């Protein structure tokens, strides 16, 4: 399952540790029943967190240049992974481990030249455009507000997947691929080098679920279900739909679009079903009685 970054820090909230840990604790309480009964692999977003670290780095006078995004991604993996493992232990007394994960991407991926992934806090349009001019950012509309965008290449593999398999076989709940994983490219000598990008966590979650042969992929967010006609008076939730029907419809690239694409990829690749819905409804999503259930 994939936890959205906004499930850990809601829009407009101060990014204080205490606030985020409160949300992580609520997430652990929602996931504990599933973790007791199933082999559970958890990925998570990091958009708000990595954006905040990037801002702090850019304004830190002790640094001659800010830390690159692959390093910031590693920092957020450790922070959020620690919170999740700690909460799962305290709430459900589960054996859980965070696997610091690198995600292989292709150096010639055109997405590296076309920023599209939202990171950091939200702004009004004027503030966003001013910050973009001052700091060399790219910004885009995210719903009614504006945010920074960075490159988001497609994941081609999770380097640490064999370690994840071993942990699952040992009966351990695994947190991996946080923030989509740390993006790396493979050189001609086989070495790996970090990339200035953020991989979409929903795409990485789908890749991991497919590679592990998972039965179900749960994409957890802050909305009850995918809506047809979202933002219009005719909006209505979609409860059950085939991947072909869902994939033929259009959804915002920066929010619901990746979740829809990931769900369709998973079931088309052999998964039993995918579900998109609220974190609080995770147990119901796992049996297909809540959210939007996507079938082959």
Image (cartoon, helix red, strand yellow):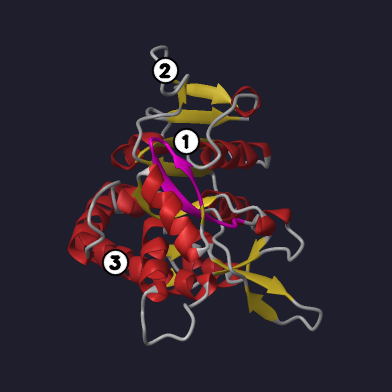
Q: Which residue is mark 3?
A: 83
Dot in front, 2 or 3 = 2
At 57% from the left edge and 29% from the top edge, which residue is drawn?
295
- The kind of secondary structure the magenta stretch mainly shows is strand
Neighbour class for label 1 at 10 Å: few (<14), some, many (≥20)? many
Q: Is residue 146 magenta?
A: yes
Q: Which residue is mark 1?
A: 275
At 61% from the left edge and 36% from the top edge, which residue is drawn?
264
15, 248: nearer the viewer: 15
Residue 246 location (% of width, % of height): 59, 26
At 41% from the left edge and 36% from the top edge, which residue is drawn?
143
Dot in front, 1 or 2 = 2
The CA span between labels 1 and 2 is 23 Å
Label 2: state its secondary structure.
Answer: loop
Neighbour class for label 2 at 10 Å: few (<14), some, many (≥20)? few
Q: How many discs mark residues in the rendered view?
A: 3
The CA span between labels 2 and 3 is 37 Å
Label 3: state its secondary structure.
Answer: helix
The CA span between labels 3 and 1 is 25 Å
Q: Which residue is mark 2?
A: 232
Mark 1 and mark 2 lie on one chain; the one further toward the N terminus is 2
In the image, the segment drawn in magenta is 139-152
């Amino acid at each position: 399952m994939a936890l959205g970054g906004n499930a850990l820090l809601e829009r407009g909230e101060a990014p204080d540790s205490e606030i985020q840990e409160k949300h992580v604790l609520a997430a652990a309480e929602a996931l504990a029943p599933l973790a007791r009964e199933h082999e559970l692999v958890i990925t998570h977003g990091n958009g708000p967190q990595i954006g905040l670290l990037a801002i702090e780095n850019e304004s830190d006078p002790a640094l001659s240049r800010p830390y690159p995004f692959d390093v910031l991604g590693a920092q957020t993996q450790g922070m959020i992974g620690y919170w999740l493992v700690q909460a799962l232990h305290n709430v459900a007394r589960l054996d859980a481990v965070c696997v610091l994960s690198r995600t292989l991407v292709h150096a010639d991926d055109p997405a590296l030249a076309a920023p599209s992934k939202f990171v950091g806090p939200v702004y009004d349009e004027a503030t966003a455009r001013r910050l973009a001019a001052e700091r060399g950012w790219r910004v885009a509309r995210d719903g009614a507000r504006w945010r920074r965008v960075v490159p988001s290449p497609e994941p081609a593999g999770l380097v640490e997947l064999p370690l994840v398999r071993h942990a699952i076989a040992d009966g351990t709940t695994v947190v991996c691929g946080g923030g989509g994983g740390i993006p790396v490219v493979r050189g001609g000598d086989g070495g790996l080098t970090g990339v200035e990008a953020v991989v979409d966590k929903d795409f990485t979650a789908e890749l991991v679920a497919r590679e592990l042969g998972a039965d179900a992929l749960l994409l957890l967010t802050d909305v009850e279900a995918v809506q047809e006609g979202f933002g219009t008076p005719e909006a209505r939730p979609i409860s059950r739909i085939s991947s072909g029907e869902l994939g033929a419809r259009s959804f915002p690239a920066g929010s619901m679009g990746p979740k829809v694409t990931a769900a369709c990829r998973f079931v088309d690749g052999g998964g039993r079903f995918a579900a998109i819905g609220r974190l609080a409804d995770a147990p119901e999503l796992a049996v297909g009685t809540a959210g939007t259930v996507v079938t082959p």
